[in-house]
Protein backbone atom coordinates (compact mmCIF):
# COMPACT_ATOMS: atom_id res chain seq x y z
CA UNK A 1 0.00 0.00 0.00
CA UNK A 2 1.19 3.53 -0.75
CA UNK A 3 1.99 5.78 2.15
CA UNK A 4 0.13 8.62 0.56
CA UNK A 5 -2.17 8.55 -2.40
CA UNK A 6 -3.34 11.78 -3.99
CA UNK A 7 -6.07 11.61 -6.60
CA UNK A 8 -7.50 14.42 -8.76
CA UNK A 9 -6.41 17.07 -6.31
CA UNK A 10 -7.72 20.59 -6.89
CA UNK A 11 -6.74 23.46 -4.57
CA UNK A 12 -8.56 26.76 -4.18
CA UNK A 13 -7.88 30.10 -2.55
CA UNK A 14 -11.32 31.70 -2.52
CA UNK A 15 -12.56 31.52 -6.09
CA UNK A 16 -9.12 31.05 -7.53
CA UNK A 17 -8.08 27.49 -8.43
CA UNK A 18 -4.31 27.07 -8.25
CA UNK A 19 -3.93 23.26 -8.56
CA UNK A 20 -5.82 21.16 -11.08
CA UNK A 21 -6.22 17.35 -11.37
CA UNK A 22 -3.00 16.41 -9.64
CA UNK A 23 -2.54 12.70 -8.89
CA UNK A 24 0.48 10.91 -7.47
CA UNK A 25 1.51 8.53 -4.71
CA UNK A 26 4.54 7.89 -2.52
CA UNK A 27 5.49 4.36 -1.45
CA UNK A 28 7.57 3.35 1.57
CA UNK A 29 11.26 3.92 0.90
CA UNK A 30 10.53 6.04 -2.17
CA UNK A 31 11.62 9.61 -2.78
CA UNK A 32 9.28 11.60 -4.98
CA UNK A 33 10.20 15.15 -5.99
CA UNK A 34 7.73 17.77 -7.12
CA UNK A 35 9.66 20.29 -9.18
CA UNK A 36 8.42 23.48 -10.76
CA UNK A 37 8.85 27.24 -10.94
CA UNK A 38 7.50 29.89 -8.57
CA UNK A 39 3.75 29.79 -8.26
CA UNK A 40 3.36 26.36 -9.90
CA UNK A 41 1.33 25.14 -6.91
CA UNK A 42 3.92 22.93 -5.20
CA UNK A 43 3.45 24.29 -1.68
CA UNK A 44 -0.31 24.35 -2.12
CA UNK A 45 -0.16 20.59 -2.74
CA UNK A 46 1.91 19.99 0.39
CA UNK A 47 -0.37 22.19 2.47
CA UNK A 48 -3.35 20.18 1.25
CA UNK A 49 -1.76 17.04 2.66
CA UNK A 50 -2.16 18.55 6.12
CA UNK A 51 -5.55 20.16 5.46
CA UNK A 52 -4.28 23.74 5.46
CA UNK A 53 -6.05 24.54 2.19
CA UNK A 54 -9.48 24.33 0.64
CA UNK A 55 -8.97 21.23 -1.51
CA UNK A 56 -11.06 18.75 -3.45
CA UNK A 57 -10.25 15.26 -4.66
CA UNK A 58 -9.04 12.30 -2.62
CA UNK A 59 -6.04 12.07 -0.36
CA UNK A 60 -5.38 8.94 1.69
CA UNK A 61 -2.62 8.31 4.18
CA UNK A 62 -1.96 4.56 4.60
CA UNK A 63 -5.39 3.95 3.09
CA UNK A 64 -7.38 6.34 5.31
CA UNK A 65 -8.88 9.56 3.99
CA UNK A 66 -7.15 12.57 5.56
CA UNK A 67 -10.15 14.84 4.96
CA UNK A 68 -11.21 15.19 8.58
CA UNK A 69 -7.81 14.64 10.19
CA UNK A 70 -6.15 17.26 12.37
CA UNK A 71 -2.43 18.01 12.06
CA UNK A 72 -1.91 16.06 15.28
CA UNK A 73 -3.75 13.01 13.99
CA UNK A 74 -1.74 13.11 10.77
CA UNK A 75 1.50 13.28 12.75
CA UNK A 76 0.41 10.29 14.81
CA UNK A 77 -0.31 8.43 11.56
CA UNK A 78 3.33 9.03 10.56
CA UNK A 79 3.27 12.15 8.40
CA UNK A 80 5.84 14.81 9.23
CA UNK A 81 5.71 18.09 7.34
CA UNK A 82 8.98 19.99 7.52
CA UNK A 83 8.72 23.73 7.11
CA UNK A 84 11.79 25.47 8.39
CA UNK A 85 10.13 28.66 9.50
CA UNK A 86 7.41 26.87 11.45
CA UNK A 87 9.37 24.00 12.93
CA UNK A 88 11.93 25.97 14.90
CA UNK A 89 11.58 27.86 18.18
CA UNK A 90 14.30 30.51 17.72
CA UNK A 91 15.04 31.21 21.40
CA UNK A 92 15.44 27.58 22.36
CA UNK A 93 18.60 25.52 22.05
CA UNK A 94 19.10 22.92 19.35
CA UNK A 95 18.52 20.13 21.86
CA UNK A 96 15.36 21.71 23.30
CA UNK A 97 13.96 22.12 19.80
CA UNK A 98 14.69 18.49 18.99
CA UNK A 99 13.16 17.25 22.23
CA UNK A 100 9.95 19.16 21.52
CA UNK A 101 9.81 17.48 18.09
CA UNK A 102 9.83 14.11 19.83
CA UNK A 103 6.73 14.72 21.95
CA UNK A 104 4.83 11.94 20.24
CA UNK A 105 6.98 9.10 21.54
CA UNK A 106 8.62 9.96 24.83
CA UNK A 107 9.95 6.46 25.36
CA UNK A 108 12.07 6.55 22.21
CA UNK A 109 13.15 10.20 22.29
CA UNK A 110 16.77 9.40 23.18
CA UNK A 111 17.07 6.94 20.32
CA UNK A 112 15.63 9.45 17.86
CA UNK A 113 17.92 12.18 19.15
CA UNK A 114 20.93 9.94 18.48
CA UNK A 115 19.66 9.23 14.98
CA UNK A 116 19.34 12.94 14.24
CA UNK A 117 22.83 13.66 15.62
CA UNK A 118 24.20 10.84 13.46
CA UNK A 119 22.59 12.37 10.38
CA UNK A 120 23.62 15.92 11.24
CA UNK A 121 26.76 15.83 13.44
CA UNK A 122 26.88 19.63 13.41
CA UNK A 123 23.66 19.68 15.46
CA UNK A 124 25.32 17.64 18.18
CA UNK A 125 28.27 20.05 18.18
CA UNK A 126 25.81 22.94 18.55
CA UNK A 127 23.43 21.15 20.91
CA UNK A 128 23.33 23.97 23.50
CA UNK A 129 23.38 26.81 21.00
CA UNK A 130 20.26 28.91 20.49
CA UNK A 131 18.50 28.01 17.25
CA UNK A 132 18.41 31.58 15.97
CA UNK A 133 22.19 31.80 16.10
CA UNK A 134 22.64 28.86 13.70
CA UNK A 135 23.52 29.47 10.06
CA UNK A 136 20.81 29.08 7.41
CA UNK A 137 21.99 25.60 6.48
CA UNK A 138 22.20 24.49 10.09
CA UNK A 139 18.66 25.77 10.69
CA UNK A 140 17.45 23.72 7.75
CA UNK A 141 19.17 20.66 9.20
CA UNK A 142 17.55 21.40 12.55
CA UNK A 143 14.13 21.70 10.92
CA UNK A 144 14.59 18.31 9.24
CA UNK A 145 15.93 16.89 12.50
CA UNK A 146 12.85 18.09 14.40
CA UNK A 147 10.62 16.43 11.80
CA UNK A 148 12.50 13.17 12.23
CA UNK A 149 12.07 13.17 15.99
CA UNK A 150 8.49 11.95 15.62
CA UNK A 151 9.81 8.90 13.70
CA UNK A 152 7.70 9.52 10.59
CA UNK A 153 6.93 7.06 7.81
CA UNK A 154 6.46 9.92 5.37
CA UNK A 155 8.66 13.00 5.50
CA UNK A 156 7.40 16.00 3.54
CA UNK A 157 10.09 18.56 2.77
CA UNK A 158 9.26 21.99 1.37
CA UNK A 159 12.22 23.45 -0.53
CA UNK A 160 15.02 22.38 1.81
CA UNK A 161 17.66 24.10 -0.34
CA UNK A 162 15.96 27.49 -0.58
CA UNK A 163 18.47 30.29 -0.12
CA UNK A 164 21.35 27.96 0.81
CA UNK A 165 24.91 28.19 -0.48
CA UNK A 166 25.97 25.30 -2.78
CA UNK A 167 28.26 23.78 -0.17
CA UNK A 168 25.39 23.64 2.34
CA UNK A 169 23.09 22.21 -0.32
CA UNK A 170 25.64 19.39 -0.61
CA UNK A 171 25.36 18.73 3.15
CA UNK A 172 21.57 18.53 2.91
CA UNK A 173 21.94 16.25 -0.11
CA UNK A 174 24.23 13.93 1.85
CA UNK A 175 21.77 13.80 4.73
CA UNK A 176 18.93 12.96 2.34
CA UNK A 177 21.04 10.17 0.86
CA UNK A 178 21.55 8.78 4.36
CA UNK A 179 17.84 9.12 5.11
CA UNK A 180 17.05 7.14 1.99
CA UNK A 181 18.74 4.10 3.46
CA UNK A 182 15.88 3.91 5.95
CA UNK A 183 12.45 2.70 4.91
CA UNK A 184 11.13 6.23 4.89
CA UNK A 185 8.97 7.75 2.16
CA UNK A 186 10.05 11.27 1.24
CA UNK A 187 8.03 13.84 -0.67
CA UNK A 188 10.27 16.72 -1.65
CA UNK A 189 9.23 19.99 -3.22
CA UNK A 190 12.00 21.85 -5.02
CA UNK A 191 12.60 24.75 -7.35
CA UNK A 192 16.18 23.58 -7.67
CA UNK A 193 15.76 21.23 -10.63
CA UNK A 194 19.10 19.50 -10.26
CA UNK A 195 18.56 18.82 -6.57
CA UNK A 196 15.05 17.52 -7.23
CA UNK A 197 16.29 15.19 -9.95
CA UNK A 198 19.41 14.05 -8.16
CA UNK A 199 17.68 12.31 -5.29
CA UNK A 200 14.38 11.19 -6.67
CA UNK A 201 13.03 7.81 -7.65
CA UNK A 202 10.30 9.72 -9.42
CA UNK A 203 9.97 13.36 -10.41
CA UNK A 204 6.71 15.22 -10.93
CA UNK A 205 7.12 18.34 -13.03
CA UNK A 206 4.58 21.09 -12.54
CA UNK A 207 3.66 24.29 -14.30
CA UNK A 208 0.79 26.61 -13.46
CA UNK A 209 -1.02 24.17 -11.19
CA UNK A 210 -0.79 21.08 -13.42
CA UNK A 211 1.51 18.11 -13.79
CA UNK A 212 3.19 18.44 -17.19
CA UNK A 213 5.43 15.38 -16.91
CA UNK A 214 6.30 12.66 -14.43
CA UNK A 215 8.65 9.71 -14.46
CA UNK A 216 12.09 8.60 -13.40
CA UNK A 217 14.86 11.23 -13.59
CA UNK A 218 16.53 9.24 -16.37
CA UNK A 219 13.33 9.10 -18.45
CA UNK A 220 12.66 12.78 -17.99
CA UNK A 221 16.19 13.79 -18.91
CA UNK A 222 15.66 12.18 -22.31
CA UNK A 223 12.59 14.34 -22.91
CA UNK A 224 13.31 17.40 -25.04
CA UNK A 225 10.48 19.46 -23.54
CA UNK A 226 11.81 18.78 -20.05
CA UNK A 227 15.40 19.54 -20.91
CA UNK A 228 14.51 22.72 -22.73
CA UNK A 229 11.96 24.04 -20.26
CA UNK A 230 13.34 22.80 -16.96
CA UNK A 231 17.05 22.50 -17.69
CA UNK A 232 17.26 24.99 -20.56
CA UNK A 233 19.25 22.67 -22.80
CA UNK A 234 18.88 19.79 -25.25
CA UNK A 235 18.27 16.29 -23.87
CA UNK A 236 21.70 15.05 -25.02
CA UNK A 237 23.34 17.86 -23.13
CA UNK A 238 21.16 17.24 -20.05
CA UNK A 239 22.02 13.53 -19.95
CA UNK A 240 25.67 14.35 -20.41
CA UNK A 241 25.56 16.96 -17.65
CA UNK A 242 23.91 14.47 -15.30
CA UNK A 243 26.71 11.98 -15.95
CA UNK A 244 29.52 14.40 -15.33
CA UNK A 245 27.82 16.17 -12.41
CA UNK A 246 25.72 19.25 -11.99
CA UNK A 247 28.66 21.56 -11.41
CA UNK A 248 29.46 21.37 -15.09
CA UNK A 249 26.14 22.91 -16.08
CA UNK A 250 26.68 26.64 -16.64
CA UNK A 251 24.99 28.53 -13.80
CA UNK A 252 23.08 30.70 -16.25
CA UNK A 253 21.36 27.52 -17.43
CA UNK A 254 20.57 26.13 -14.01
CA UNK A 255 17.90 28.74 -13.41
CA UNK A 256 14.43 27.35 -13.79
CA UNK A 257 12.34 29.03 -16.41
CA UNK A 258 8.69 29.57 -15.65
CA UNK A 259 7.58 29.48 -19.26
CA UNK A 260 5.04 27.12 -20.75
CA UNK A 261 6.07 26.18 -24.27
CA UNK A 262 3.34 27.14 -26.70
CA UNK A 263 1.56 24.14 -28.18
CA UNK A 264 2.81 21.62 -25.63
CA UNK A 265 0.19 19.21 -24.41
CA UNK A 266 0.50 18.14 -20.78
CA UNK A 267 1.55 14.50 -20.89
CA UNK A 268 2.87 11.81 -18.62
CA UNK A 269 0.54 12.25 -15.69
CA UNK A 270 1.57 10.21 -12.75
CA UNK A 271 -1.20 7.72 -13.16
N1 LIG B 1 -2.83 32.02 0.82
C1 LIG B 1 -2.96 32.26 -0.49
N2 LIG B 1 -3.95 33.06 -0.95
C2 LIG B 1 -4.12 33.29 -2.27
N3 LIG B 1 -3.34 32.78 -3.23
C3 LIG B 1 -2.32 31.99 -2.83
C4 LIG B 1 -2.08 31.69 -1.46
N4 LIG B 1 -1.00 30.88 -1.37
C5 LIG B 1 -0.59 30.69 -2.64
N5 LIG B 1 -1.38 31.35 -3.51
C6 LIG B 1 -1.25 31.37 -4.98
O1 LIG B 1 -1.33 30.03 -5.43
C7 LIG B 1 -0.43 29.82 -6.51
C8 LIG B 1 0.46 28.65 -6.17
O2 LIG B 1 1.29 29.03 -5.08
P1 LIG B 1 2.28 28.01 -4.37
O3 LIG B 1 2.92 28.70 -3.22
O4 LIG B 1 1.57 26.74 -4.11
O5 LIG B 1 3.33 27.77 -5.54
P2 LIG B 1 4.80 27.16 -5.43
O6 LIG B 1 4.96 26.32 -6.63
O7 LIG B 1 4.99 26.50 -4.11
O8 LIG B 1 5.69 28.45 -5.57
P3 LIG B 1 6.93 28.90 -4.64
O9 LIG B 1 8.03 27.99 -5.02
O10 LIG B 1 7.14 30.31 -5.04
O11 LIG B 1 6.48 28.74 -3.21
C9 LIG B 1 0.31 31.12 -6.73
O12 LIG B 1 -0.29 31.80 -7.79
C10 LIG B 1 0.11 31.85 -5.41
O13 LIG B 1 0.11 33.24 -5.62
Image (cartoon, rainbow, N blue to C red):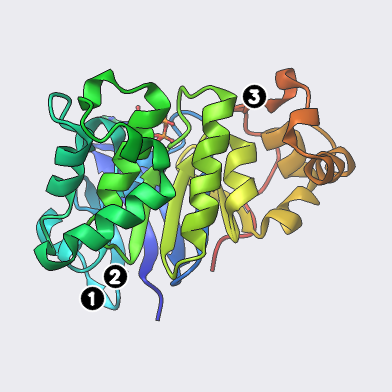
Q: Quadrant of residue 122?
A: top left
The residue sitting at 37% across, 64% down in the picture is: 6
Residue 136: in sight, yes or no?
yes
Q: Ligand 1 is located in which of the four quadrants?
A: top left
Q: Which residue is mark 1?
A: 64
Which of 62/111 is in front?
Answer: 111
> Residue 183 location, x and y as percent?
44, 70
Q: Is residue 242 above or below residue 228?
A: below
The residue sitting at 46% across, 36% down in the picture is: 40
> Residue 150 location, x and y as percent?
22, 58
Q: Quadrant of the C terminus?
A: bottom right
Q: Residues within 10 Å of mark 2 (few under 14, many from 20)?
A: some
User: Which mark is nearer the camera, 2 or 3?
Assistant: 3
Specify the label residue 60 is tagged with.
2
Local secondary structure at mark 2: strand
Q: Which residue is mark 3?
A: 255
Do tag 1 and tag 2 residues touch (Cβ < 8 Å)?
Answer: yes
Do tag 3 and tag 1 residues touch (Cβ < 8 Å)?
Answer: no
Local secondary structure at mark 1: strand
Which of 185/224 is in front?
Answer: 185
The residue sitting at 43% across, 58% down in the picture is: 186
Which of 266/66 is in front?
Answer: 66
> Residue 260 location, x and y as percent?
63, 33
Q: Quadrant of the N terminus?
A: bottom left
Specify the label residue 9 is tagged with.
none
Amino acid sequence: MSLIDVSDLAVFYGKSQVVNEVSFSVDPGELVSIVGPNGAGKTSILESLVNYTDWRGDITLKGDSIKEMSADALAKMGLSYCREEENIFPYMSVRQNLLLGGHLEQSRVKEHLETVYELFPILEERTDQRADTLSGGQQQMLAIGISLMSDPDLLVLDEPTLGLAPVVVDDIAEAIDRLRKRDLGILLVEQNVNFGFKHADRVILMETGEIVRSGSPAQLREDDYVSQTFFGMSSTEATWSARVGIASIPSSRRRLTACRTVGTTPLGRDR
